[in-house]
Image: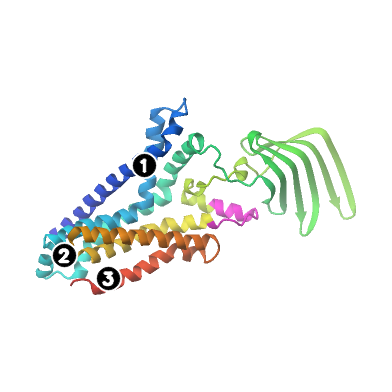
Amino acid sequence: MRKLDRYIIFDYWRTFLFVCLALSMIAMVIDYSEKVEEFIDEPLLTNHEIIFDYYLNFVLWINGLLWPLFALIAVVFFTSRLANNSEIISIFNAGVSFNRMMRPYLIAGGTIALLHFIGNHYVLPRGNKIKLDFEHAYVWKESDKGKTRDIHMFLGPGEKAFVRYYRKKDTTLVDFRLERFEGNQMKWLLKARSVEWKGEPDHWLIRGYEIREFDGMKETLINGEGKTIDTTLNLHPSDFVRYTNQKEMLTTPQLMQFIVKERERGLTNTRMYQIELYRRSADPVSILILTIIGMAVAARKVRGGMGLHLALGIVLSAVFIFLSRLSITFATSEGMPALLGVWLPNIIFAGVAFILVRRAQK
């Protein structure tokens, strides 16, 4: 690694850190102004919880979300400064090609992308869980979007459950039905007026039950009216409660297990969770693509100077965000495959990066 490489790499990292700090502070001020009334209305909420449970993880969350755009702004900012100071021209005059000058940019951007990849899959979800638990407790008190009526799900191979209504206030299943099959024939059926959650691990109390066992044309009835059964079921209250951003609270191994579990239970609406899984790998690649675009745009010295370059960088950021939201919307509504919906912005901007590099000042 030559002195030029070290110079560009550390300049990239310094500028990137400055952009992250500056924009994170702005985001914190805006967020605090929106939530300060909720904080004041909670007498038991302490400053320690606000700072360390919420805003520390809020900073991690906003950076994990916007690092690709922060990288683009940072590259445009410091590369434009190099161009205005005629340092880019001097580098070319020294016999360094444009492709060779890209190397330190890719090393610096690749390091940030690697950190982002690890953070997206393993670190940020843990912080998001603390942040979202805080928001659910003090800000969005009624933010769960779970299904509570007429729920069908498989608890295991050949075992199907139906719940007429899930009562959240006391974690009770009302009008519960459990069926067991062998092949296409029902062999066992349980109906219960209510089933109450008693604690871990999957401990439930069945009240007012009726059990039917089938052996060919023979049927056996067990009437448990007024009686209870203390048992375990492959059910958990969390199966009936879904928070809007629950997918952000799961690490990638947990998210993959969750998707498999939902599919096994016949709950096939896992598209949002698949999109989140793919997004965690696509965003780090965006950093590399936007780094190349920012370099190609800002390396040319123009009359408008740094201001014009920054304006162009902001426009590119806005277009990237718009395209990302649009493609994810189509993917969510099954207008396109989830994988394509997540990676489409990267594919398009990779093409833009290729064209800009071909036409960049050499």
Which is more toward the observer, 300 or 172? 300
Q: Main secondary structure of the magenta part?
A: helix
Q: Residue at x 24, y 65 (%)?
A: 297
**Residue 264, quarter of picture:** bottom right
Q: Which mark is residue 303?
A: 2
Q: CA distance from mark 1 to mark 2?
A: 35 Å
Left or right: where does residue 69 sit relative to residue 86? Answer: right
Considering every residue shown, the one lying at the far right of the view is 218
Q: Which mark is residue 356?
A: 3
Q: Earlier in the sequence, mark 1 or mark 2?
A: 1
Residue highlighted by disc 1: 30
Look at the numbered disc 1 and give the secondary structure of its residue: helix
Question: Badge 2, how many Cα within 10 Å: few under 14, some, many 20+?
Answer: few
Q: Which mark is residue 140?
A: none
Q: Residues within 10 Å of mark 1 (few under 14, many from 20)?
A: few
Q: Earlier in the sequence, mark 3 or mark 2?
A: 2
Residue 4 image offset from top left, x and y in percent: 14, 60
Name the residue furthest top: 43
Q: Nearer the viewer, mark 3 or mark 1?
A: 1
Residue type indicated by callout 3: Leu
Q: Amino acid at mark 1?
A: Ile
